[in-house]
Image (cartoon, rainbow, N blue to C red):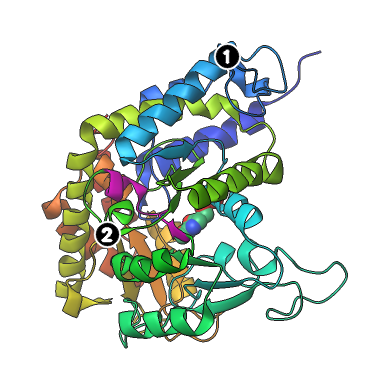
Amino acid sequence: MSVNISDVLDIVSRQNQWRGREAINLIASENVQSDAVKQAEINDFMGRYAEGHPNTDQKDRRYYEGTRYIDQIESMAVSEMIKLAKCLQADVRPVSGNAANTAVALGILRGNDTVIVNSIENGGHISHNPIGVVGRRIQVRGKVLTPGRENSINLHYWPTTEDGYHLDTPRCLDLLEQTSPNMVILGKSLFLFPEPVKEIAEVCRAKNIPILYDGAHVLGLITGGQFQDPFKEGAHFINASTHKTFPGPQRGVILGNMSSEQEMKWWNSVDRGVMPGSSSSHHLHTLPGMLIAIREMAEYGHQYASQTVANAKAFGQALTDEGVNVEAEEFGFTESHQLALNVTNFGDAKAIARSLAEQNNIITNYNLLPGDKDPNNPSGLRIGVQEMTRYGMKEADMQELAALMKAGMEGKVVKDEVVLLRSRFTEVNYA
Ligand SMILES: Cc1ncc(COP(=O)(O)O)c(C=O)c1O
């Protein structure tokens, strides 16, 4: 008896048509993969296990047999990632950016430690915060989580300048002196401008404090040479997703630039945080695709990243010209792939995001902006242009899109025009 799967296939094909062909995707944490990456994801590795590290001629490092081909792929992914990111270590096993953060937290942090992070209100990621892995990993079983209490992590938040999008470096350095943290985390989810890594790293390195730069969003911009270079500025770790500005499969990576005895202790502890700490087998079937994406970025990353940032800036200006309140105008809107829009003059941000997606095929997410107090009542939309850039959009196309987006935010239905615009951008570039 054959299984009836037509309804499942029908839903998949509707998704492919809607999000893959007819919608303009402005979610800042997503991207589209090249056909080569997608094709390389369908393979026998899908059902296999490969815990540990690749075997070498000298040493067995796996806990299962049958791994000769994933050993090759994983070793190549590690060495090509190290070359691309110009660093000394790479662990390509985390299945996502969150898993990478979990591994570092498990490896480095212990109860009562102190960590400085970006708050959620100022764009920080949930995994760094009280309900995420950094804030709660030492939670005592059966007790209500109270950050600052015995066994939990004492979290402090980087102070920002008045605009909320930049760290206030002198006050950050004061906080470092006052708190003597066990680790600091830079990088965030609403990430418009570089962080003062260099200044913070000077102090941290003198005090032997590990610096984790969470580049989940900006990995592709960093490897493309279009954002700050956190390793050059002194970071020890860069954690990232490999599917945002870096257009690979949904996975994560931990990069390291460490050599001293103390630093190698951190790297080895994080290794145990990856396996067995936060993963066993690591979704092997997506690793060949990631290796292909690493090569695409080695070849085209610079061009792709520079067009992405140029498009984001152009989109910021075009939206402003349309009368939309784009945050950080006085700083040129952004240095990354993202923009933050304050949409309160059009109505409720959640409702606007929903109607843009459902009525007009423009996909965004609502977001807290600096100063927002109620997580259920955000005033912003976060948008990213990395996917439409990969589909070939340039600065002039941003103007067309800005007009449609403004009309959508005003409650007009411009879906047909959006579908028409999207139909001009269906091929994946930079691959
Ligand atoms: C700063 C930051 N770190 C980590 C993550 C989690 O990454 P992933 O979704 O790959 O688990 C995100 C997600 O968007 C993020 O913005």
Magenta includes 220? yes
Give the crowd class for mark 2: few <14, some 14-19, many >=20 residues within 10 Å. Answer: many
Label drawn at residue 430: none
Q: Residue at x 35, y 41 (%)?
A: 87
203 relative to 109, above or below: below
- Give the mark nearer the N terminus: 2 vs 1: 1
Residue 278 is drawn in which quadrant?
A: top right
Between 180 and 240, the one nearer to me in the picture: 180
The relative height of residue 49 versus residue 343 in the rendered view (above or below) is: above
Estimate the x, y position of residue 83 in percent, counting from the top left.
Answer: 32, 33
Q: Which residue is mark 2?
A: 336
Q: Which residues are magenta?
A: 211-223
Disc 2 marks which amino acid? Ser
Residue 340 visible to an observer of this rendering: yes
Q: Secondary structure at mark 1?
A: loop
The residue singled out by tag 1 in the image is 58
